[in-house]
Amino acid sequence: MGELTGAEALIESLKAEGAKHIFGIPGGAIIPVYDVLHRESAIRHILVRHEQAAAHAADGYARVLGRCGVCMATSGPGACNLTTGILNAYMDSSPVIAITGQVPTPALGTDAFQEADLLSIMMPITKHNFLVKSVDELAKVVRLAFKIAISGRPGPVHIDLPKDVQVSRAEVKIPPDVFHREKVKPDPDPKRIAEATSLIERAERPVILSGGGVIWSGASPELVELAELIGAPVVTSLMGKGSIPEDHPLALGMLGMHGRKAANIAVTECDLLLAIGTRFSDRSTGDVRYFAPKAKIIHIDVDPVEIEKLVKADVFIIADAKRALRALLEALKSKIKRGVESEWLKRVAQMRKDFAPQMDYDSVPIKPQRLMKELTGVLDENSIVVTEVGQCQMWAAHFYTVRKPRHFISSGGLGTMGFGFPASIGAKVAAPEQKVVDVAGDGSFLMNSQELATAVENKINVVVCILNNSYLGMVKQWQDLFYEKRRSQTYLGKTPNFVKLAEAYGAWGDQVTRPGEIASKLRDALECGKPAVLDVVIDPDEHVLPMVPAGGRLDRMITEA
Amino acid sequence: MKTRVFSVLCENVAGVMMRVSRCFTRRQINMDSVTVGIEPSGLARMIILFKADDQMTEFMRRIISRLEPIIDVQILEPKESIVREVSLLKTRRLTEVEMSNVIKRVQSAGGRILELKDGAIIAEVSGDHEEVEQLISSLGNDILKEVARSGQVYISKEI
């Protein structure tokens, strides 16, 4: 490759990894890198308006493509603004590569202008992080960073790059491969597969709990095949939503705090729970003492840390979900006849019918359930729904029907308000031919609404569908249910006028107040040829129900307000 | 709660101690003793003592094993290991009676006098944690001006 500056070596290394997009904002400590980007045509840089949005956009991009997303910022405040987005990616196991400028190495630790101790700050919120001290190691570090981010359980990796390293020169050779210690063998232990097989064979009421790990390992086809083979309904965590097409007769939807009643009851009644690529989050399990109380549990995860962290498994399999599922299919095919018409499946079908969510509301103000029904109708199976956090997110998770993996993107572990809009920008950049809708709340959207400028300037035509109830709705719901309706500091009022806000940025804006108008206005928004904001005025008193109170039992749901 | 011993083999790179120690901090576990040394291979070995139940110990083993620069984490059983701690003890200026008393105690504990200067003593003692602890507490705060302790090093007896 010859003699290169650190900045050139970085960009060449990113190209060697196949990176085509970077979301970021330049600043003093990373100008040399941006100077190289200025003449680079193989990488498109999308200038965002706040670094948090760069991290979320890279995260959304990564989740749609199943590859690393890259974000970039300057030192100090730029890098610190990335941190919420990086932690979000860490909690949800998303492979984001964050690159930040840093003060020159001689100035490290001197409280130099815009200096922050990023090596320390990023350590607990990344899978791994690097401070690059010379050009010689840069190409190797980038290669290693991408490898670490995507291997095993994915996660974000941070590279801190002091300015003097960016400008100093060295002979640079991009290594074809780098040594990376394999933490976990992806193939399952045959002994454990045999143990799991015998539990599955003996089960009368099996349930599969599918998490984000199924999506990351691309194991959806195997998941569906196994569910059909053993006659098990599939419930998903929030991160696992889409791992099975939700219109499949065995799909029971999301479980947990705001899960479907049928999903929660099925988990409570089952005699075998096959949990795959899931970490048993408290939002999924409720009180673990009453979680799947009658069931033997098989837990498959690629991260050994998740094994027996919260829920003790009768059999655990540390392996890649796809490979483990294939091994189970192989072992079970000869033993179980396809399409078993069991009593259990009859019970499951009955529950699906009895507990089908009610969505046909014609009332004004609009019920969010109705909006989700309309959204499911207007969008096709290739459309991507991204969500903000709070009530809007849980309504989408509960009522919107996802038909493919990687087509429902949400901030799960961290619950980051402001995630949805920038993540939808990342999703649209990753999949420009697909429709992308951010299901937003009025509170969440305002946390990163400045990214309308990014969307408009870069012609990234996403639709923000605001479920506008003038409240920080989920907090208000908790106040209504558990704090005797004292709505302390959750009323947001009628500010701003979201249509005018959209128009001020040069985006399309409109408001919907009647249920009959939802579908046509959604279509208008999707076809307007611009980024669009659809302000849907919803019932401010509506709660997300059913609900399992925090730490409560899954079979004890609050069903009415 | 029982004392646990980790023998952590890791790359000898800047920040690795912080990566390991913050895993303990986050779970509100105190590291009772930490020692680090470099092996002939160039890799570093940390010996870490802490208190935890079985479940937390296994969880911590997995958490630390997951870190990039970590190669291996072994849980050592005190009964199947050799344990040593080295301490350097500096006394205040002593009277002649005190001095002969200190020398006697150090020697009977298997220690060595390294330095006799201006009526003060610098001594070395090694042994398992209890042996070292016993000498230090028998000499006491009045006699000892400064104590430097190595922390406990463990090695498994398994060949």
Image (cartoon, coloured by chain):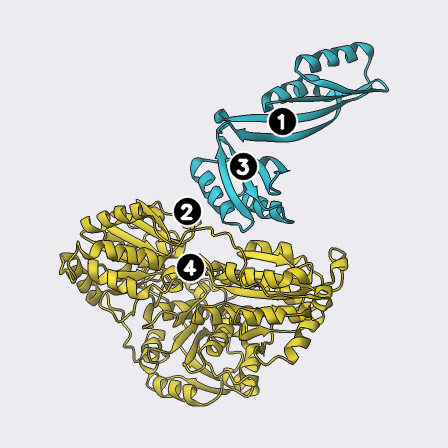
Chain colours: A yellow, B cyan
Neighbourhood count class around disc 3 (C-alpha, 10 Å): few under 14, some 14–19, many 20 upward: many
- Name the image quarter holding residue A71: bottom right
Q: Point out the tag, 2 or 4, that comes first from the N-terminus.
A: 2
Name the chain under label 3: B
In the rendered structure, which amino acid carries the disc numbered 2? Answer: Lys
In the rendered structure, which amino acid carries the disc numbered 4? Answer: Glu
- Name the image quarter holding residue A6: bottom right
Q: Position of residue A251 (x, y in %)?
A: 26, 65
Residue at left offset 59%, top offset 46%: B11
* B12 shown above or below A332: above
* B82 shown above or below A311: above
- In this view, the mark in front (2 or 4): 2
Residue at left offset 65%, top offset 22%: B126
Nearer to the camera, B39 or A416: B39
The CA span between labels 3 and 2 is 22 Å
SS type, badge 2:
loop
The residue that label 3 is drawn on is B7
- In this view, the mark in front (3 or 2): 3
Q: In the rendering, which numbered label is found on residue A79? A: none
Q: Residue furthest front?
A: A2
The residue that label 1 is drawn on is B85
Horizontal side of A289 relative to A122 (left or right) equals left
Residue A552 visible, this angle = no
Name the chain under label 1: B
Name the chain under label 2: A
In the rendered structure, which amino acid carries the disc numbered 1? Answer: Glu
- In this view, the mark in front (4 or 1): 1
Q: In the rendering, which numbered label is found on residue A309? A: 2
Name the chain under label 4: A
Q: Residues at marks 4 and 1, common chain?
A: no
Nearer to the camera, A430 or A417: A430
Horizontal side of B75 relative to A2 (left or right) equals left
